[in-house]
Amino acid sequence: MGKYPPGSGKNRRIIVITHPEKDSKGRIAGVFLTSILADMTVILEVGCHPAITSESSVVFEEAFIADSEIIYKGIENGLLRLHEELLKIEFLEQILEGVFESAPRKIERFCTENS
């Protein structure tokens, strides 16, 4: 497994959609957000949460499974930032619905087993 989630970078926004305690190996599933509206499955409007400052879509084709320690280290090192307000149930439910519609099968299976 890589040092950081696949495709992560300074300007990539990641949403963790499963809790590490649900998986026996401490892994999480995550998705990226982008202001380029390529995938229209889930569109997040400006202001739906304080962290959403431009109309954004969830990039389900790049959904990933990663060791939760990678996420924690990214936060500790300032590469990732935690937005508690993104952890609201309604917000995550909207994204999970999109997972079951548009994400790769292995991500869908992982979320089913670990949600």
Image (tube, helix red, strand yellow):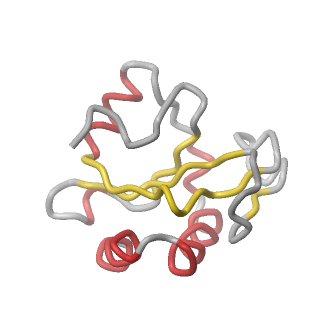
Q: Is residue 88 left or right of residue 38?
A: left
Q: Nearer the viewer, residue 62 or 76?
A: 62
Expressed as whole percent of the image width and height from the top left, the position of residue 48 reads 79, 54
Determine the residue positioned at 54% across, 63% down.
60
Q: How many marks?
A: 0
Q: Quadrant of residue 75?
A: top left
Determine the residue positioned at 38% across, 29% down.
74
Expressed as whole percent of the image width and height from the top left, the position of residue 102 reads 56, 74
Expressed as whole percent of the image width and height from the top left, the position of residue 47 reads 83, 48
As displayed, is residue 15 above or below residue 61? above
Q: Is residue 46 left or right of residue 51?
A: right
Q: Quadrant of residue 115?
A: bottom left
Q: Is residue 67 left or right of residue 53?
A: left
Determine the residue positioned at 59% across, 57% down.
59
Instruction: Name the quarter where the N terminus is drawn.
Output: top left
As displayed, is residue 99 above or below residue 31? below
Q: Nearer the viewer, residue 84 or 54?
A: 54
